[in-house]
């Protein structure tokens, strides 16, 4: 009887030990999996936070660039607005009848200046020297709207090109 | 994203304008012929000259604004704005 009880106790003990071992192994495996998942989630959170920060920085940069763009677009309207205002203020027909040379000088100076400004707008330096005929304008008013600091280093300037335009 | 090179700048040729009225017509014809060797020219009315100037001003506005829009996009795709893609994380069961 005693042997049977001892055998039964041993069997129960063995089973409990086995179950405990299995539970321990299973728990360790679960803990390892959870640790790994936790590490991956931490990386994911870090990545998401970095992405949010990057997006916020980009949004701030885009807002600033957009603001600058709106300002530049507005500034680009200035030349046309000023020209329209000038044409409204001045009666060119009357001026052409009274002082044609004065008007001619102003027109040529403004036109030469405009060509150079357009060169600058498209990335050029706009430093082409003024044509000789413009510098030696008899009225001397032609350069009023032009850059006075430009030096004509070419004898022919735009005259040759202008006169050969077919 | 690599930026595309801009087109080369425009190179413009100077153009000479003559303002002539009835009183200065003879003088203009003589001077014009001495410079150009003939009396063939293209005339514009004051109104058409104004329209031409306004047209050029409008083209200039467009060029300037187009340039600013390009600068905006160049800034947007610049090296500091690389999109950071959130990597997918596969969790084990």
Image (cartoon, coloured by chain):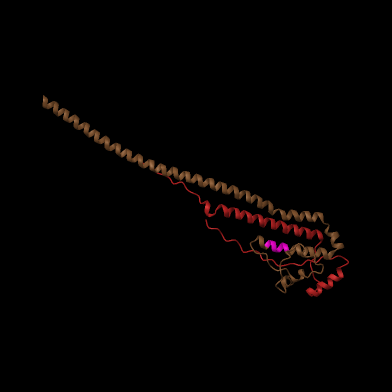
Chain colours: A brown, B red
Q: Nearer the viewer, residue B29 or A139?
A: A139
Across and down, in percent, residue B5 comes to: 57, 61
Residue sticking out furthest to the front:
A149
- Horizontal arrangement in the rendering, residue B54 relative to residue A12 (left or right): right
Along the line of sight, the residue nearer the viewer: A80 or B48 = A80
The percent position of residue A59, horizontal first and vertical second, equals 56, 46
Q: Residue at x 77, y 58 (%)?
A: B51
Measured along the vertical axis of the image, is residue A156 above or below residue A142? below
Q: Where's the N terminus of chain A, which quadrant?
A: top left
**Residue A123 vertical placement versus A9 (above, below):** below
Quadrant of the snapshot with the C terminus of chain A: bottom right
Residue A55: x and y, percent?
A: 52, 46
Q: Tell me how many marks there are.
A: 0
Tell me, yes or no, if residue B80 can be seen here. yes
User: Does residue B43 lie above or below A26 as drawn?
Assistant: below
Q: Kindly identify the residue that appears in the image at 47 percent across and 43 percent down.
A: A49
Describe residue B54's horizontal placement relative to residue B73 as left or right: right
Q: Which residues are magenta?
A: A113-118
Left or right: B11 as drawn, with respect to A12: right
Res A24 → quadrant: top left
**Residue A15 is inside the magenta segment:** no
Q: Residue furthest right?
A: B23
Query: Is residue A6 placed above or below B5 in the rendered structure?
Result: above
Q: Residue at 11% of width from left, 27% of height from top? A: A3
**Left of A23 or right of it: where is A106?**
right
Q: Is residue A161 visible?
A: no
As drawn, which residue projects farthest toward the top? A1
The answer to which image quadrant residue A11 occupies is top left
Q: Position of residue B78 (x, y in %)?
A: 54, 54
- Is A115 colored magenta in this rendering? yes
Predominant SS along the magenta part: helix
Residue drawn at the location 39% of the way across and 43% of the way down: A40
């Amino acid at each position: 009887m005693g042997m049977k009880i001892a055998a039964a106790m041993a069997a129960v003990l063995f089973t409990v030990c086995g179950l405990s071992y299995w539970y321990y192994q299973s728990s360790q495996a679960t803990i390892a999996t959870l640790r790994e998942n936790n590490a991956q989630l931490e990386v994911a959170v870090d990545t998401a936070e970095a992405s949010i920060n990057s997006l916020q920085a980009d949004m701030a940069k885009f807002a600033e660039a957009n603001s600058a763009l709106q300002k530049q677009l507005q500034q680009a309207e200035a030349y046309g607005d000023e020209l329209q205002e000038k044409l409204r203020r001045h009666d060119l027909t009357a001026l052409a009848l009274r002082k044609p040379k004065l008007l001619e000088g102003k027109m040529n100076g403004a036109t030469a200046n405009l060509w150079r400004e357009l060169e600058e707008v498209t990335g050029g330096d706009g430093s082409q020297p003024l044509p000789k005929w413009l510098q030696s304008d008899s009225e001397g008013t032609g350069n009023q709207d032009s850059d006075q600091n430009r030096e004509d280093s070419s004898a022919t300037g735009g005259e040759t090109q202008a006169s050969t335009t077919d | 994203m690599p930026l595309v090179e801009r087109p080369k700048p425009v190179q413009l040729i100077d153009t000479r304008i003559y303002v002539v009225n009835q009183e200065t017509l003879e003088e203009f014809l003589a001077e014009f012929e001495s410079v150009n060797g003939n009396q063939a020219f293209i005339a514009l009315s004051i109104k058409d000259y104004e329209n031409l100037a306004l047209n050029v001003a409008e083209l200039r506005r467009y060029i300037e604004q187009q340039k600013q829009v390009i600068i905006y996009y160049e800034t947007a795709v610049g090296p500091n704005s690389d999109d950071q893609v959130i990597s997918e994380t596969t969790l084990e069961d």
